[in-house]
Amino acid sequence: MSLPSAYEAKKYEDAIYKKWEESGIFKADADSNKPAFTIAMPPPNATGVLHLGHAVMLALQDILTRHRRMKGFEALWIPGTDHAAIATENVVIKKLKDEEGIKEPREMGRDKLVDCIKEYVAGSQDTIRNQIRRMGASCDWSREKYTMDESLNRMVNEIFVNMYKDGLIYRGHRIVNWDPNLKTNVSDDEVERVEEKAPFYTFQYGPFQIGTARPETKFGDKIVVMHPDDERYKDYKHGDTFEAEWINGTITATVIKDKAVDPEFGTGCMTITPWHDATDFDIMQRHEEIEAEQIIDFDGKLLKIAGEFAGMDIKEAREKLVQKLDEKGLLVSVDENYVHNIAINSRGKGMIEPQIKEQWFIDVNKKVVEWKGVKMSLKEVMQDVINKKDIKIIPERFEKTYFHWIDNLRDWCISRQIWWGHRIPVWYKEDKDSMDMHVGIEAPEGKGWEQDPDTLDTWFSSALWTWSTLIDPELTKDPSLSMEDLLEKSPDFIKFHPTHVMETGYDIIFFWVARMILMTTYATKEIPFDTVYLHGLIRTREGKKMSKSDPETCIDPLDMINEYGADALRMSMVIGNTPGNDMRLYEEKIKGYRNFTNKLWNASRFVLGIFEEKGLKEEPIIDYDNLSPADEWILGKLNAKIEEVDKQLTEFNISDAGQNMYSFLWDDFCDWYLELSKGEAQNPAVLYYVLKNILILLHPFIPFVTEEIWANMPGQTEMLIHQPYPEVDGKKHSQEATENTIAIIKSIRSMRAENNIEPAKKAPVIIYAKDVDAIKKNEAEIMKMARVDKLTVEKSGDKIKNAAADVVNGIEIFIPLDDLVDLEAEKARLEKEIGNLEGYIKGLSGKLGNDNFVKNAPKEVVDGEKAKLSEGEEKLAKFKEQLSSF
RNA sequence: GGGCGGUUAGCUCAGUUGGUUAGAGCGUCUGGUUUACACCCAGAAGGCCAUAGGUUCGAAUCCUAUACCGCCCACCA
């Protein structure tokens, strides 16, 4: 056995993953006696490719899953993909246009287009699956789900029908966010607003002057609105009518007073277009006399009402219209510097044109949901589970954001006018407007029933994700089973739901997290998860969003895996990444963690070499009665790390846990223990024990390299991924001797550097210490690692005048020099130390003298403070003694 | 307009109910082939913890303002 001196991740990763997968360890058992730990993986777009957002979520979730699995949980991590309705339909339509030369793919008809999309998805789904594997994700592929699976479709339909029966789903004419480009409406959350500079026009409108940035909507305006208290317009009463010369001749207009108008803005009065503006729509609803009229069609072209402008694209019409009004003498002024927010669709980036349309909605205010025995509205349930701490959000501050969103939440529009998605389970006798409507999974008996052409918002099906994935697909084929039956008869649902952690980006807390809470509490009467862990977004070194269009700053995770290995990428995404905060990522950082995996590789290579030399064939047993101070030290440190890292991972301090292990391996194990154990002092049993546990502790973070090294550990027959989490050895290890040794070595090294004693050169050193024997035990190590050629250790002695001097832990160290040392500076330093310590002790005694603190603080804290106090007092005494010796 | 975050070393970031001399990685500088590792080892320099007040024996940490940066939400035509 001889391993290469550099770890090349590429050579090993794929084979290791295959072995894990084939071993069946990813597969969770619903019959197991172990407690369950479940994560539902946020499903990436089925047709997508892996990006850094996926990489970070996979790294975090895999760490948690592997840790809990080692801790003895029945760990289930369910993978899956999302059908991403609008996005996918667009991609395929675009493809058909560009590649197949089909001008209007929708003319193929619904069934054909949906088939094309299905085919495309099936063909590209493997890409993302394999990319998830390359990250090392230990998810249960046997349970993989797709949001368009038959079984999930059954759940979607069941919920829709149940919600309809409960009166939570209704159909109505509302103003919606219409995207003329994609020919569908989108939910409020999917609308983005961007600033745009546009001319702001003021027109004469009868006796009034009205302002608008959108003259092309004004054709049918017959209502002028102003604030009821506006003094300027007090002569005009609500309901007054007047004649006005307008775009296409004279019209009769009506005055309406409404508080929605801001008197400070523009002229303080405006005309309204309820069909194409949400504010205007609201005003209309308050005044019966207003009627809405459609001006712009669903393709973004002007309708008949526009007269000579009919059929024109709105952008084109605007200029011509302004010109016409100008010619008629109705244009009062133009403000070219006006800036306003325009609405765009966050999906396709097309402009949003508000339209009135009949749509399906979920009522969030109706109090018909039974939760904990009380009838509540969906909103109230969503608030309750967070208020009552049934669900914990990390970081906590996002609870505020969540509540704020709920306060402003309006009914959720769930229908979409696209073809790709779960179809609405509603049937009409003749046409959509017919009164003969049936809500149900199957069409009713008889001829002439047509299904609603609309599909459901993607988030409707995603919202069921934590549990729809756990329903037994076989059961869903039986139409006689009710929703409750399906839940009660599915072993996975019983064992693994509610899930434990929902780990996702904070950017989809509304889209997804909130909706999962809404739908899951309604459907299952359970919470979907008990902890929400929100990671931040990955940004470039400059703090900008990474965009694919800019390859300079955009990092492709697959390139990084190829170059540095999945382990290095995982580590770099996790360390320094705190929940809720964005993180900047750049190649050097990943490279740094590649160096870390290599460090582990080489340290292991060294240790394995020792085993080979000693002919070790199986795991040795430590002889606790014959341990060197260094052995005691590293065993003590290891015990501490086992506890700390476990606590950190349990409490979701993933970054801290990673850093903790990073420094344990590099600083403690490599830089001190391995160095100290070169030579005679080597203890293979301790080396084995510590390395073994390091591999286990690091495995959740860097699973590949640890597994590969593990395969070379003598006597280990089972893979590392199967190992239980280590326990402390239950022994007390005194670490003082080695800590002193390290401090002495560091001090000597540092003094040498300060005094320009060449590193290669050896020098004599004199040490005064109370416990001479303890230091003499480590004499060899000190001499070797600090390059000392003559070491004198004595209980005490005269001050050495011509020497570099230092005091660590009460041990005085001198390197005799030709130059003089500044004794005065040393004295001043000590005096300062003593001053500081006295303050420190005073403060601590004050705290401990405070009854409130002693009573209320946890016992460990009080004990900790007491320990600190006595430690401080000891040190103070030492320093005082030293000062008196001057 | 409302809300939330950030401001700590040249860069990217930690900093856990306030506690001795504020940490890490990268970068920089100096020196180094010593039984693994140059993807390495040893050492050094570098911080008025954004600013101004306050509470406290003691503040990066708690409070109050201010400034700059970022994000989210909101119907100003």
Image (tube, coloured by chain):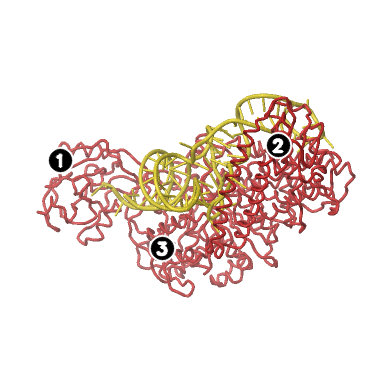
**C-alpha gap between disc 1 and disc 3:** 45 Å
Q: What residue is disc 2 on?
A: A747
Please determine if labels 2 and 3 lie on a single subunit.
Answer: yes
Nearest to the observer: residue A333 or residue A284: A333
Residue A197, given in percent of the width and then of the height, sits at 31, 38
Check disc 1 and report its element: helix, strand or loop.
Answer: loop
Callout 3 amino acid: Ile
**C-alpha gap between disc 2 and disc 1:** 88 Å
Q: Is residue A83 visible?
A: no
For mark 2, does the 10 Å Cα neighbourhood hold few (<14), some (14 to 19), or many (20 or more) residues? some
Position of residue A803 in the picture relative to residue A321 (left or right): right
Q: What residue is disc 1 on?
A: A330
Q: Residue furthest bottom?
A: A373
Task: Choose mark 2 or mark 3, whichever is in front.
Answer: 2
Q: Which colour is chain B painted?
A: yellow
Q: What residue is disc 3 on?
A: A362
Rendering quarter of residue A414: bottom left
| Chain drawn red in the picture | A
Q: Residue shown at 28%/45% (left/top)?
A: A302
Labels 2 and 3: the sequence-earlier one:
3
CB atoms of marks 2 and 3 within 8 Å: no
Check disc 3 and report its element: helix, strand or loop.
Answer: strand
Labels 2 and 1: the sequence-earlier one:
1
Nearest to the observer: residue A463 or residue A38: A38
Chain letter behind tag 2: A
Residue A474, given in percent of the width and then of the height, sits at 62, 65
